[in-house]
Amino acid sequence: MTAQPTLSLAIASDPAADAERRRGLRQMRLIALSLLVLAAVVFLATVRVADQGIWGFVNAGAEASMVGAIADWFAVTALFRHPLGLPIPHTAIIPRRKDMLAKSLQDFMAENFLRDEIIRERVLSARVSERVARWLLEPANTRRVVDEAAGVVTSGLHRLKDETVAELVEEAVLPRLRAEPISPIAGSLLGEVVKDRAHYGLVDLALAEAYRWLDLNELTFSSVLQERAPWWAPQMVNDYVIKKAHVEAMRWVSDIRDDPEHPARQALDDLLAQLSEDLLHDPATMERAERLKNRVLDHPQLLATAVSLWVAFRTAFVAALADVDGPVRARARSEVSRFAAQVDGDPQLRARLDGLLADTVVFMVARYGQELTEVISSTINRWDGKETASRVELFVGRDLQFIRINGTIVGGLVGLVIHAVVLLVR
């Protein structure tokens, strides 16, 4: 079996910034190395007079400075590579243990930055609702938000194909409607309509249209009744009866229209109330309602009608959104401004909105925080070890050179102290 090649992910870099970092790293390395060379030169220059008064302190300090400088050079270098290329144990830590360090960094981020109380405190202290509300109070910002939203909605409506809508209706909506009993819904809705007298406006409209039709279509009314008149009756009698029926029909419709307490209206209310009860409790009525529902849902024209309604709605809505100064966008801007003003002037509402936002962020972090922190380890794991060490050294190596510098200086001071202690003991 052949080994699968390891995928490596190139580390993003800025050439100009990297050049500046590299120049700073070289400068600090040169300073640290210069101090080491200086300590070595002083040590060699004073080694013959190390037992002569003050020169003993100078020689001891220079010797300790060399030891400190070399030790700290070894420690700093061991982070990124093997010192002098020698495979000394526990060196080249970053290239060899990159994956473990990545996992430790991931755990550190999760335990110290993605805690619920920290996230909630930061979100609440940001006062997002107040800032957004005041930003939206600017008319230019309100227009911008509405325009961007209109563009997104328009793009989404254009991308939603008619075939997709048809599949959604056929595969999701219609099966759900078939499975859901229609009688309880229709019965409850009809009962509430009758109880609240919400149907009165529709009845008034129907009566007004019926009266207008009778008034404008007397000939049609007469011809319909003429076809059903007895053949043996004299024509004059038929004409009189039909004329009388037309007048009475108009009077009857007019009476019902003008009298809210007309017996016919009450009879209609009783009929609707009884139908509501039957839809809720009568098995025969419930069965007939289900059969009617299924016949409607199974009709082949239903799907085409639904898609046609969708197309008509989309066309009208897109056209309305396209008008920059049209009523839809104007109303949207008005509502956004009104809501922003309400939020800006209501501290309790702002507190609720900020709390809701904090709850949402905490929930999202609790649910997806693991995946978020895994981005750190999974990304570092795909980096090449040597390249990772080189990049890390480029970013922090300049500061690490201060360890070498401090080691040189502190080592020299410690050497002076030790030499003084030796002289006292002697």
Image (cartoon, grey):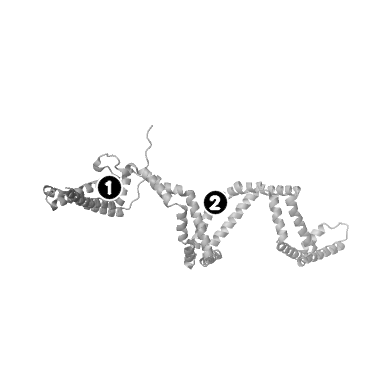
Q: Does 346 appear above or below 19? A: below
Find residue 416 and report its horizontal and vertical position in percent: 19, 51
- Residue 389 is at least partly visible in this image: yes
Please name the residue shown 48% across and 63% down the image. 132
State the residue in front, 426 or 190. Answer: 426
Estimate how packed mark 2 is, as few (under 14), some (14 to 19) or many (20 or more) residues with alpha carbons within 10 Å: few
Find residue 408 and report its horizontal and vertical position in percent: 22, 51
- Residue 382 is at least partly visible in this image: no
Q: Is residue 192 left or right of residue 4?
A: right
Quarter occupied by residue 254: bottom right
> Which numbered dot is residue 76?
1
* Residue farthest along the front direction in this orientation: 425
Quarter occupied by residue 9: top left
State the residue in front, 160 or 391. Answer: 391
State the residue in front, 302 or 413. Answer: 413
> Which numbered dot is residue 161?
2
Q: Is residue 9 left or right of residue 155?
A: left
Whichever of callouts 2 and 1 sits on the residue coming sooner in the sequence is: 1
Please name the residue shown 84% across and 58% down the image. 229
Q: Is residue 219 left or right of residue 25?
A: right
**Residue type of the residue flagged with mark 1:** Val
Find residue 321 and report its horizontal and vertical position in percent: 53, 61
**Residue type of the residue flagged with mark 2:** Lys
- Tell me the SS state at disc 1: helix
